[in-house]
Amino acid sequence: MNDLTKNAEKLLVLIYKYYKFRIDNGKSLENAKFVGDLDHLHDNLHIKFSLEDTLELIRELSRAKYLNVTWADNTAYLIAIDDALIIYGENRVADTIKNWFEWADTITAPFKP
């Protein structure tokens, strides 16, 4: 993951956290991978960055093969988590993930999933 910017790493962790939240609340593993479009993701994660900046981070994660994105009208129309992101999250110990979540929360507003 050394090829990602710090903000892209933070968003990656937040998306993994959102994925786990959705599973914990009854979504199937497959359905939890689909996180919606840019607006949905931005709003549900309460990201402090502008939509444009969030879109750039999504592009970065897509290029790094952590997200599968369907593009329409030059925006992220459908965002799905790639198995690489899940594998990354699952290979971390619980304390490390807790620390990553706290670190990643620095790009979110006070209310989050």
Image: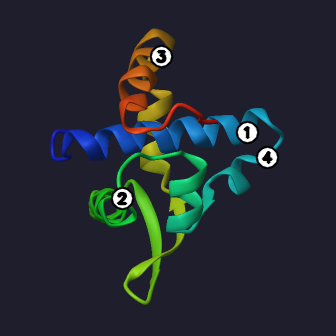
Cα distance between the residues tagged 1 and 4: 5 Å
Cα distance between the residues tagged 3 and 1: 17 Å
Callout in the foreground (3, 1): 3
Q: Position of residue 48 (x, y in %)?
A: 40, 46
Cα distance between the residues tagged 4 and 3: 22 Å
Tell me where residue 19 sits by quadrant.
top right
Q: Is residue 30 left or right of residue 35?
A: right
Q: What residue occupies the far top of the structure in this picture?
A: 95
Callout in the foreground (2, 4): 2
Cα distance between the residues tagged 2 and 4: 28 Å
Residue annotated with mark 2: 50
Q: Amino acid at mark 1?
A: Ile
Mark 2 or mark 4: whose residue is earlier in sequence: 4
Q: Amino acid at mark 3?
A: Lys
| Quarter that holds the N terminus | top left
For residue 27, the mark is 4
- The answer to whether marks 1 and 4 mark residues whose Cβ atoms lie closer than 8 Å is yes
For residue 111, the mark is none
Residue at 40 percent of width and 15 percent of height = 99
Mark 2 or mark 3: whose residue is earlier in sequence: 2
Q: Position of residue 60 (x, y in %)?
A: 27, 60
Tell me where residue 40 sits by quadrant.
bottom right
Residue annotated with mark 1: 23
Q: Is residue 4 left or right of residue 79?
A: left
